[in-house]
Amino acid sequence: MPRVLLIEDDPSVREGVELGLRRRGHEVRAAATGEAGLAAMAEFRPDLLLLDLMLPGMNGVQVCRQVRDHSQLPIIMLTARGDDFDVVIGLEAGADDYIVKPARPEVIEARIRAVLRRIDDSGSGRPAIEVYGELTVDRVGLTVTKAGRRLALAPSELKLLLHLSGAPEQVFSRQQLLEHVWEHTFHADARLVDACVARLRGKIEDEVGSPRYVQTLRGFGYRFGPL
């Protein structure tokens, strides 16, 4: 089972989430501050970070940015209702998903599995390696390079690119992408998609303002190409 690092300052929330994850077989390390959580990362080597936004001292956004400076570890933010502004900043900082507290253990577990689930393109009939100009997508090795340089993509960014490039020129609505990439079957927050697109463009596009690969069709959604 995936190893989870939980950073949450509220003792009751921290203990409840930790207990729920342990009951489902996860190995969990919990920390009450961002500084303590970052210190535990190297030793614990988690598979996923469950990160509260509102932390004392170093807040969740700062922790997220620091992790993203050197790691593509999957990150799910925990946020209280009404923290809309902080949610947007957290997503832009590199978080893969977020959960509004309080959340049932089964919801947290489902989100963890969705973020960690690897893309399985076997039997799709698509070539393993696809080249789009300077961009090379390895659908089996799950790597992306640009002009020969490997790009560090967070899990949600990689899944989004694989999904869009799997059907070039097809337009996907935000809700469709939420269902296929994030596995949210309910009417979820479109900001997840927009923030992820912005981060992905920052890594694969030459000019973010004139994207070549991930294009917007206003009122409809996003598509890959035409190149």
Image: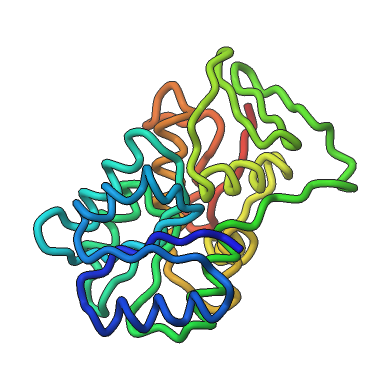
Left or right side of 224 for 56 = left
Residue found at x 55% / y 64%: 178
Q: Nearer the viewer, residue 136 or 72?
A: 72
The picture places residue 48, in percent across and down from the top left corner, at 47, 56
Q: Is residue 191 visible?
A: no
Left or right side of 127 for 113 = left
Q: Nearer the viewer, residue 137 or 71?
A: 71
Q: Is residue 180 above or below residue 10?
A: above
The picture places residue 23, in percent across and down from the top left corner, at 53, 81
Left or right side of 57 for 116 = right
Residue furthest to the front in view is 43
Name which quarter of the figure residue 83 lies in: bottom left
Name which quarter of the figure residue 13 lies in: bottom left
Q: How is the image coloured?
A: rainbow
Q: Nearer the viewer, residue 117 or 11?
A: 11
Residue found at x 29% / y 58%: 88
Q: Nearer the viewer, residue 219 or 25?
A: 25
Q: Is residue 141 above or below residue 124?
A: above
Q: Is residue 171 above or below residue 100?
A: above
The picture places residue 152, in percent across and down from the top left corner, at 48, 32
- Report how many numbered discs are placed on residues in the image: 0
Residue found at x 53% / y 66%: 112
Name the quarter where the N terminus is drawn: bottom right
Q: Is residue 137 visible?
A: yes
Name the quarter where the C terminus is drawn: top right
Residue furthest to the left in view is 57
Residue found at x 67% / y 39%: 165
The picture places residue 117, in percent across and down from the top left corner, at 64, 57
